[in-house]
Amino acid sequence: MHKKIFRSSLLTVCLVLIATIALIMGFLFHFFEKQIQAELANEAGFLAQAVENEGIGYFDGFDDKNSRPSRNNRVTWIGKDGTVLFDSRVDASELDNHADRDEIKTAMKDGKGMSTRYSKTLTEKTVNYAIRLSDGSVLRVSTEQYTVITILMGMLQPILITISVALILTLALSARVSKAIIEPVNRLDLDVPENNDTYEELTPLLRKIANQKETIEEQLADARKNQKEFNLITENMSEGFLVIDADANLLTYNSAALNLLEITPPADRSVLLFCRAKEFRGVISDALSGIRAEDIMARDEHSYSLIANPVFEGETVIGAVVVILDITEREKRDTLRREFTANVSHELKTPLTSISGFAELMKAGDVPEKDVVDFSESIYDEAQRLITLVNDIIKISELDGQSIPFESEPVDLYELSKEVIGRLENEAEKRQVTFHLIGDRAEIMGVYKILEEMLYNLCDNAIKYNKENGTVDVLVNQTGDSVNVIVRDTGMGISPAHQGRVFERFYRVDKSHSKKVGGTGLGLAIVKHGAMYHHAKISLESTVDVGTAITIAFAKI
């Protein structure tokens, strides 16, 4: 703006200067023209008087410089018939008849005459003034007329000096004036538009800026509020959230999406570059083609549900919203449920088949009397196995549903361990396994029945999977904020490949050995669910052919 005002001021002054010089030249030209005409009239009058007094003899003295007309004017004497009698510059005999000249005709008629024309003799534009003498002849005085160019050339130096000085002053003044005009504008405080002391003409503009600023601030506040709410919602979502444009470029996302997909996306990049899974690319492609798409994507050990919805503007797809759900646990539960159903079916089918077979033989009456007792004992054992299996399933179901009908109470884990060991003493003696109870009193808040079942299953497994002359150590101690129960045996141990799954329902490390020692395969699953019910932490350490130690850490009262 400063440059624009400077250029405008400079151009204005230059145009004014040029116009002023042109006007001055016009006035000077008009002034000089009048001046020449007056001088010619005066000189013609003096010369006419001299000629009247002296006749043609007066022109004999024209060789004397003092006798010549001023400014070297041309003097011509023309007779009545137009013949040139005398000319101060050209031989009179060489000149044509002048009777047809305008100034001559006018002078002969009116006594005086004046004209301006281009002289062929002098090859210049001349001003002619003629006066009639008493004898009828005419005396004419002529001079070269000043032209604008002639005047301009004569005044070229002062004009150039004037223009130079004017330009320098114009540059300096234009710079100062433009700066002075702009300075109040540059000092405007647009943060508080209405508090500026500046040109009155800017008041409406400043008022409008203030109104627009207030509107923009309100809109920005609303936008920030909406953005904050959006971020709070999306960042607190466990589901991944992606918004892409029509070219699959990532526009916005939440942290959950990055964590689920384990990506660190740069800005303005195609989302297809971050995850190249077939299922992911498929739902993106379908959504951008205007179709709602769903699929399940497996990534490492996780499973994700992908839901992609197209975003329309009119009938045009301008992007898509992608939601990513971590369904790993659900998939695992479904898998466990299917395995549980299959395992329960298998575990129930085996004793039922035996019971049905024995009962069928007995019903047919083909069983010798001596074998009836053996068959009845087998039926009883299989029935007890079914009852144990059903009871274990009920216990796990109760623990899963948190529907335990007992209240928590203080339980001394040391005394409880002693009681459980006492119940298993006979079984341990049969297998030649020795128990050692180590520790001291340690109370926690829990459900006695569940804790008893947990310790019983741990100790029972320690006996079943132990070696002859093996030992089982039950340690009860307190460390920091926890009360620990450790059941450690010197048995067959568990390989690292199986350690992560031994707490699953019906999972058996060595099925042949498990079949020999009996059990339902739900013991450690009950321990795990009992620990979860009491918010306890369970850990396992095992070495093949050395033994296994299972630790349950309960919170102190």
Image (cartoon, grey):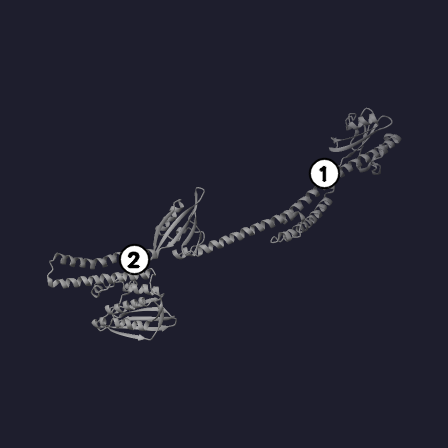
Using residue 405 as the reference point, say whether residue 312 is left or right of it. right
Using residue 269 as the reference point, say whether residue 22 is left or right of it. right
Q: Which of 536/494 is in front?
A: 536
- Residue 284 in the image: state x and y as whole percent: 39, 48
Q: Is residue 504 visible?
A: no
Q: Which of 369/155 is in front?
A: 369
Q: Is residue 324 visible?
A: yes
Residue 453: numbered disc: none
User: What kind of element bears circle 1?
Assistant: helix
- Residue 427 in the image: state x and y as whole percent: 22, 70
In the rendered image, the vertical position of residue 283 relative to residue 81, given as above or below: below
Using residue 35 as the reference point, say whether residue 345 is left or right of it. left
Query: Mark 2 highlights which residue?
Result: 336
Residue at the (14%, 64%) spot, across then down: 373
- Residue 521 in the image: state x and y as whole percent: 25, 63
User: What kind of element bears circle 2?
Assistant: helix
Between disc 1 and disc 2, the foreground one is 2
* Residue extending farthest top: 81
Query: Mark 1 highlights which residue?
Result: 149
Q: How many discs mark residues in the rendered view? A: 2
Q: Amino acid at mark 2?
A: Leu
Q: Earlier in the sequence, mark 1 or mark 2?
A: 1
Decide: marks 1, 2 in contact (CB < 8 A)? no
In the rendered image, the vertical position of residue 62 relative to residue 404, given as above or below: above
Q: Quadrant of residue 465?
A: bottom left
